[in-house]
Image (tube, rainbow, N blue to C red):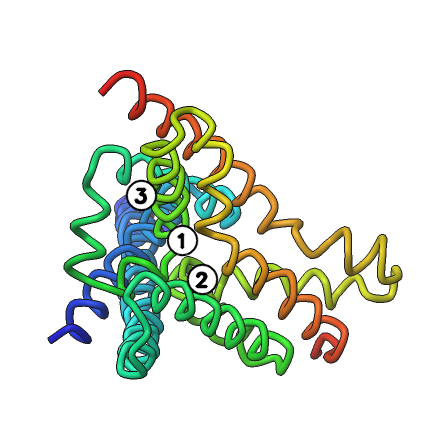
Amino acid sequence: MTKANIREQEAYSVFLEDFRPKRATLRNIVVAFLVGGLICTIGQGVLTFILSKGIPLKQAYVLTSSVMVFAGALLTGLGVYDRIGSFGGMGAALPITGFANSVVSPAMEYKREGFVLGVGAKMFQVAGPVIVYATLTATIVSIIKLYVF
Amino acid sequence: MPYVRAFVVGGLLCAIAQAAMDLTKANPAIIMVSAVSMGAILSGLGLYAPLVEFAGAGATIPLPGFGHTLVTGMLEDAAQWGIFGILTGGFKAVSAGLLSAVLFGYLMAVLFNPKG
């Protein structure tokens, strides 16, 4: 191989290096947008249905979350949500259905370690940190709102 | 139109989370924690309530909506009882979500076994 050839090849691999991850990232972001958007649209459908039953807005939002948690948990149990997750990335993980998935997955996985130290303890392996930091941040934000503003 | 707004806003929130994960190479759990905290902060800045107004489920279904609900609940009770409201209001507002996660999560984990 000539020097020029090698240089050319190096330049090309640098070019690829620069190109490939970006394309993968762009694909991931687009897919996350579509999957997340779709899940939220389904949520909006549930909300619209609940509101049509004459339930007040605030309760309707709460009920919608519960329905979506149920759906996410059921689909995880059926083995469907993990497939949506590996395809949709954050589009599947960020909606509350993904929160339900993060509860059911480890709980199911660790069932063989028993119902207390397995299911009970591992259920909130991922959801636990989310609740902890949400609570801490919300408390700090609320105190600031209450006393500073 | 409410469906389009829910789709676009919900999708955008997920796209931002995905971009943050790809760019920082962080663990998904760290992104989820950051997202929920960001929701609480945006709520405190008064930016999240208009987003819910605009996008409905598109803003409440993604995790930042959980942080927003916590802050809203705390401030609602705080308006009545001052600092003690922060102790009572937060979990009151998210109780249905948490209870559903525990109840349905446990139920499904008991009923089903992992696939593959």
* Protein chain holding label 3: A
Q: Residue at x 78, y 60 (%)?
A: A119
| Three-letter code for the amino acid on which mark 3 is drawn | Lys
In the foreground, A25 or B3? B3
Q: In the rendered structure, are the residues bearing label 2 and label 1 in contact, judged by CB atoms less than 8 Å apart?
A: yes
* Protein chain holding label 2: A
x, y percent for residue A38 = 30, 75
| Three-letter code for the amino acid on which mark 2 is drawn | Ile
Are dots 1 and 3 on a single chain? Answer: no
Mark 3 and mark 2 lie on one chain; the one further toward the N terminus is 3
Are dots 2 and 1 on a single chain? Answer: no
Residue denoted by label 3: A3
x, y percent for residue A106 = 69, 60
3D distance between C-alphas at marks 1 and 3: 54 Å
| Three-letter code for the amino acid on which mark 1 is drawn | Leu
Residue denoted by label 1: B63
Q: Residue at x 23, y 64 (%)?
A: B56
Residue denoted by label 2: A96
The answer to whether B84 appears left or right of A50 in the picture is right
Q: In the current view of this chain or complex, which residue is farthest to the left?
A: B1
Disc 1 is placed on an element classified as loop
3D distance between C-alphas at marks 2 and 1: 6 Å
Q: In the current view of this chain or complex, which residue is farthest to the front?
A: B80
Which dot, 1 or 3, sits closer to the camera? 1
In the foreground, A133 or A94? A133
Q: If the image is split into quadrants, where does the C terminus of chain B sit?
A: bottom right
